[in-house]
Amino acid sequence: MTDALKRLSDEGVAIWLDDLSRKRITSGNLAELIDQQHIVGVTTNPSIFQKAISHGDGYEQQLTDLATRKVTVDEAIRMITTADVRDAADILRPVFDATDGQDGRVSIEVDPRLAHHTDATVAEAKQLAWLVDRPNTLIKIPATKAGLPAITEVIGKGISVNVTLIFSLERYREVMDAYLAGLEKAKAAGLDLSKIYSVASFFVSRVDSEIDKRLDAVGTPEAKALKGKAALANARLAYQAFEEVFSSDRWAALDKAQANKQRPLWASTGVKDPAYKDTLYVDDLVAPGTVNTMPEATLDATADHGQITGNTIAGTYEQARAELDAVAKLGISYDDVVQLLEDEGVEKFEASWIDLLNSTEAELKRLAPSEG
């Protein structure tokens, strides 16, 4: 086994695990990954919780207690998920302390059914921060149009945020703007900006999945030659945007007030097409000041045979732009693709949440004490 994960960390990429379950916490597996695999953070989403809780490992006692108390299914899910996030945050607390708050963080997402409702998203974010009650939590807010003002409001209240479901370069710039506006609000309110953190989760593999499908439909040799290039090009241009925004005069004023940069986080880094190397979205997205959140299979693949050769983003912007332009010239609309992916992302998380509601409700009924 190589120590590719250490090399990746040394290049300035924070390695986070894109998974959480109670069994992972109680078995010592999470602590082991922190000790041995350079894991310095955890991300969750509705699909991850749906999978963990439906498999049932470690949740029966809490579900029994919740059923006995006759809580609603929504409250039950909040109690279960926030308990897992709180326990994971405690395990990661030494990393949080050692990195002055930059890493050692666990993300928990607002109810995905609120993705298009700004005020409800803000209220839910405040509630989640209060429920988990750990300084090393990030509240995940989707980068929908309604999510943008919610990001500003939540950051303005001093709550750290993981902005999720970013697919387009234009939306990413809007996310960074929303973050800076939030910091400006927090500064005006007299809050300590050094305690507020954020990452912007830019989704990678799904871009290739959708554009590759359209390239196959075009079917020309030119189209086939572009397969597997759009996602990396898109992410690399996102990093260019990050560099621009966080070297601006607007940022300089916040930097003086000890604000933290909003780091780009590469999400959806598991390869969907088996024709591509399984470490593609790790090896080829190495740059300082980034986060890569990986499913365990990608983490293991990177540890085993990842090829970390230094910064693989610097100097690629011209080529990345040319590749996206070449895709557009074939009649594939970038705007159409990224909007579709955002809509599908929200729908997928909402469907997972509804599955979770239904399976948890069935468990609560099964475990409810008989009357009498």
Image (cartoon, rainbow, N blue to C red):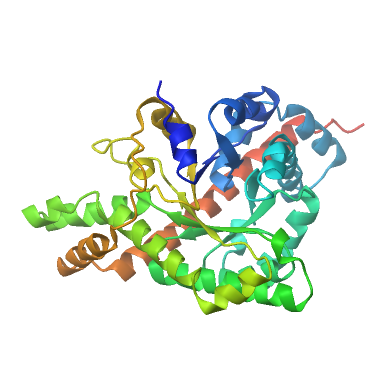
Measuring 46% from the left and 49% from the top, which residue is drawn there?
A: 267
Relative image position of residue 363 (x, y in whole percent): 70, 34
Classify 317 as above or below 2: below
Between 138 and 322, the residue placed more toward the observer is: 322
**Total number of numbered discs in the rendering:** 0
Measuring 71% from the left and 48% from the top, which residue is drawn there?
A: 136
Classify 138 as above or below 237: above
- Give the quarter of the figure containing the N terminus: top left
Between 310 and 340, the residue placed more toward the observer is: 310
Residue found at the far right of this picture:
372
Relative image position of residue 72 (x, y in whole percent): 77, 48
Residue found at the far front of this picture:
256
Between 186 and 336, the residue placed more toward the observer is: 186
Does 131 sit left or right of 31 as displayed?
A: right
Between 130 and 120, the residue placed more toward the observer is: 130
Q: For residue 178, what is the image quadrant?
A: bottom right
Relative image position of residue 43 (x, y in whole percent): 58, 45
Does 311 sit left or right of 365 as displayed?
A: left
Measuring 67% from the left and 29% from the top, which residue is drawn there?
A: 25
Residue 129: in sight, yes or no?
yes
Q: For residue 187, what is the image quadrant?
A: bottom right
Classify 366 as above or below 355: above
Residue 120: in sight, yes or no?
no
Relative image position of residue 338 (x, y in whole percent): 37, 64
Residue found at the far left of this picture:
221
Does 236 sit left or right of 109 as displayed?
A: left
- Give the quarter of the figure containing the C terminus: top right
